[in-house]
Amino acid sequence: MIAINSVYKYVDVENGERIRIIEINQHNVYVVNIDSVTSMPKKEDINKIKDEVECSKLLEIKDPYIKIIEDSELTDTQIKIRNEDWNFIEKYWNQYKEEILNKSKRSKVLEFMSKDTGYSLTKIKKVFSRFWQRGMNKNALLPDYYKSGGKGKEKKLSGAKVGKPRKTDYYGNKVDGINITDDVKKQFSFVINKYYRNNKKKSLKEVYTLLLKDFYSDNYIENNEVKYKVWDKSRIPTYDQFYYWVKKKEDIQKDIIFRESEKEFNLKHRALLSNSKQETDGPGTRFQVDATIADLYLVSSLNRNRIIGRPVVYAIIDVFSRMITGIYVGLEGPSWIGAMMCLDNMIADKVEYCKEYGIEISEEQWPCRHLPEIIIADRGEFEGFNVENLINNLNVKIENTSPYRGDLKGIVERSFRTTNEKIKHKTPGAIQKEFRQRGDRDYRLDAVLTLEEFTQIYIKIVLSHNSKIIDKYPMDKEMIADEITATPINLWNWGIENRKGRLKTVDREVLRLNILPKGRASVSRAGIRFKGLYYSSDKAVKEQWFINLKVRSIEIVYDPRNMNKIYIPYNNGAAYDECYLIDTSLQYKNCILEEIVFNQELDAELKNKASREQHQNNIDLEHEIEKIVAQAKKEKSKDINYNESQNKKLKGIRKNRAVEKEINRQDEAFKIGKDVIKADKVAEVIELPTAKVSEDEAGHNRLMALIKQKRDEKHGK
């Protein structure tokens, strides 16, 4: 399918022309050459473009201008130029799009813009060309020199006074003044935080006076009253200097919140990320996204006896067709991570996604894998740093609803109510609205579904929704004439064919690098450690990270839904290195991050419990050892012969060992069969001939008999 913002290259000619699709209507597409200095839109027949794509004359390629650019890396000048050009684009591109695309009317409307803005025609053509050629997003308008020079950087000050020379005073004296050093800036910051950012609402003039009082004056006592004398002009900053640096570093949001209130800021001053365009003119114009907590308890996939709570369900719905275009089921509470994973699913191949859960579908059953023009969302997930990349790099507008206004996203809210009603009476562990009576069984104990199994159920619900007739859908005359049934899939397909829509395609890897959460991983001889798991990579092995250990910490990007791999971005995010689980952590293969953290916490809890028991065992062991040693000392004291010398005691060690070994052999010898003689049977005595023994042998035998007798007495024999 031909999509807006996709890039193609002609491959049948040398140095083939590369073009970008900037607009589509029912019969035509409008393209621009992305390699020329300036390029005006050219109209092409849509069927011709499709034929050239099918016959491989025109090949879709990766967008060469896709970049991940953080605002924090830009200078004030770069942001200013970009924003001025973006305001120009927003004002004239949307309002005069048809005239600009029409070659016969273009010159006239461009001349009008020139008179209206004061820009030259060359300037206007360059701005439009840069916007079209480089991705039709805000950051496409950044100037090419953004990596060069030192603009926006503060000067390193020497002893000489910088800035515009001062004029002479009334008496003809020239006063140089002071430089604004880091110490002076700290003083400015201190007085702003102390005197300006509070509900007393002091003016900057008053704050400047208090700055001089606190840092640039001498105090003295007069009539028992402390007074202040300001230093001469050559030793103090001027009000203009103070005003300049305060405005340069000001935080408008913080100032308004401290001086007024957070409610006042949200009501009158908070940033509006896009306009409030209400109408939809086809699929992809507006998507609604929201999250809910399902009325169901789940169990762990590692041990079904463990209840892991209720899952969080995200859904994205196209307003025009009511088609569900993206979902996420997990344990991550409503947050950017959950929203991010839902956005990733929004552009995923749904055939492959369903196959991961054992569900076979065709492309026609769920054909959604596109970015919209506008996303309507809650304030929480889509008012942070992460969403700036979505807006600036991918040109997706975000409209945030007001607090406590779920009715502004009625379509997706209604979908959640339907889902909860379906699972309420069908699945064990579902929350029942009726109050439980005393003694009733806790429904949480009935939970049997794992997160994966519940996801399978929700996918089935989504597929059913996409082919179900929508009650009270406002059908157009053209839909009725074409005999269209109001199901999401029919409305989606009809809208693509008959309405221009605003669907856009984007490389999934580019989207992920823009929205996936980042983290820091440590490197050691054991591997790359992140979230308690260990990884390796081809790049790390090749560069001998685990041996050389020059790299101690790296920034990684990870997907909480599948921790089998993490990614190390490089080349400004244009490429990445995959890291895979090693044997040490293979027990967590195919587990989601929530379950890994859950089991790690459980393992730590079990170890902590075992540690307490081990401490008690160690104490008991110490006591038993001391008890046995004390008894041994007591027994030895009975046999001590104080008349024997130390030399004599040490001399018989070998002989004593031989005697002890012989006694142990008799005690340790196996006794097989009956060894107890019946009492009613008289034992027969057999006389054995005795041999003469030496005096040493006789002494040895007597010693053994004595030791054996003592041992028998000890054991009660």
Image (tube, helix red, strand yellow):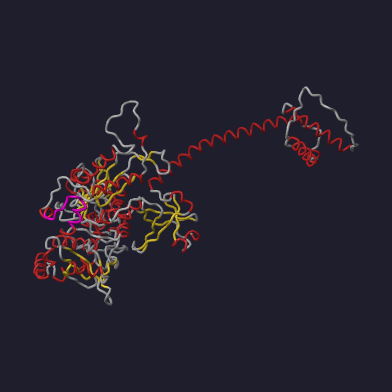
Q: Quadrant of residue 178?
A: bottom left
List the single residue furthest toward the bottom: 14
The span picked out in magenta is 481-495
Q: Main secondary structure of the magenta part?
A: helix
Figure quadrant of the N terminus: bottom left
Residue 532: x, y in percent? 44, 49
Q: Nearer the viewer, residue 267 or 26?
A: 26
Residue 3: x, y in percent? 22, 62
On whether residue 403 falls in the magenta region, the answer is no
Residue 288: x, y in percent? 22, 49
Question: Taking 705 as reference, is 588 left or right?
Answer: left
On whether residue 485 falls in the magenta region, the answer is yes
**Vertical side of 696 occupied by 139: above or below:** below
Q: Nearer the viewer, residue 236 or 320?
A: 320
Note whether residue 265 is visible: no
List the single residue furthest toward the front: 483
Residue 535: x, y in percent? 44, 55
Q: Nearer the viewer, residue 287 or 366?
A: 366
**Vertical side of 88 occupied by 210: above or below:** above
Q: Quadrant of residue 567?
A: bottom left
Question: Taking 111 as reference, is 407 left or right?
Answer: right
Note whether residue 580 is visible: yes
**Vertical side of 612 occupied by 64: above or below:** below
Q: Please state the total of marks drawn on the protein image.
A: 0
List the single residue furthest toward the right: 692
Figure quadrant of the C terminus: top right
Residue name at image x 19 percent, y 72 percent: 38
Q: Quadrant of residue 437?
A: top left
Q: Nearer the viewer, residue 319 or 141?
A: 319
